[in-house]
Image (spheres, rainbow, N blue to C red):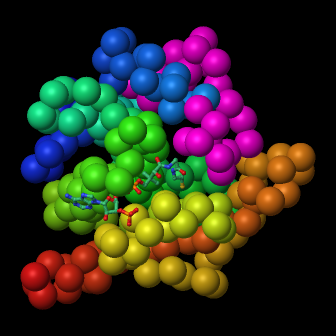
Amino acid sequence: MIIAESERTVIRNWRPDDLDLFWLINSDETVMEFFPARRNREESKAMMDRLTQMIETTGYGFFALERKSDNVTMGFMGLALTDLEPALPKGLPEVGWRLAPQYWGSGYATEAAERLLELGFGERGLAEIVSFAVQGNTRSTAVMERLGMVHDLARDFDHPRIPDTHPQLKRHVLYSMTADLWQRRRDNR
Ligand SMILES: CC(C)(COP(=O)(O)OP(=O)(O)OC[C@H]1O[C@@H](n2cnc3c(N)ncnc32)[C@H](O)[C@@H]1OP(=O)(O)O)[C@@H](O)C(=O)NCCC(=O)NCCS
């Protein structure tokens, strides 16, 4: 099932043959620098099955990101509904990303995320989409800034699912894009 396409990417539901890539992005030390846990192949398979199911039933979640030129799967891109109470209201739409390192530095994450903002605001009528990352994950906040999202300092939060064993990963910065801001940026292009 294809969710959306950008010039160089396809955003789609998962296929069984994505598992090796999905496992890699859940276990690679460089990719997972700002996450407390690593997932083995079996845990990655279970997570991929859960994501597949969620996408099929709700249309939201973390989708596979494929490069058009050679059909390789590069990682995931999400237009998902948060479940991080009490830090964030349940069901707040977020955009998120995780690519294997060999696909960094080519603009794929920003390009695909632009398309997900268009899906969220232009096609699904959302009022706001947020994105968040560990303070210091500058590669991720740079994507947010390239998208024109605005850092909302008042809504920075401590992630409720980060265990006390990793205090340095708790504090998260929150960036926001409202439908109004998205439309204004669009009109100014
Ligand atoms: C966050 C992450 C997706 C960012 O990836 P990225 O490749 O840096 O981001 P983009 O795809 O937007 O690419 C931008 C870079 O490509 C460059 N680029 C090259 N060709 C380009 C093109 N045709 N168009 C746009 N940018 C291009 C840009 O100049 C920029 O380079 P810079 O980082 O040297 O400034 C990636 O680092 C990642 O997966 N990290 C691990 C997981 C993670 O932390 N996820 C976020 C959790 S909140």
Image check: 88 left or right of 106?
right
Q: Magenta region: which residues?
A: 28-52
Identify the residue at image location x=18%, y=26%.
71
Q: Is residue 113 visible?
A: no
Of residues 120 and 90, which is closer to you in this image? 120
Residue drawn where x is 61% and y is 71% of the image: 173
Q: Position of residue 49 (x, y in %)?
A: 46, 19
Residue at 59% in and 42% down: 30
The quarter of the rendered structure image containing the N terminus is top left
| Residue 95 location (% of width, % of height) | 41, 56
| Residue 119 pos. (x, y %) | 21, 55
Rendered-image quarter of ligand 1: bottom left
Task: Using the image, determine if residue 46 lies above or below residue 87.
Answer: above
Q: Is residue 51 inside the magenta stretch?
A: yes
Q: Residue at 10%, 82% (x, y): give it.
A: 189
Seen as rendered, the residue at the extreme right is 165
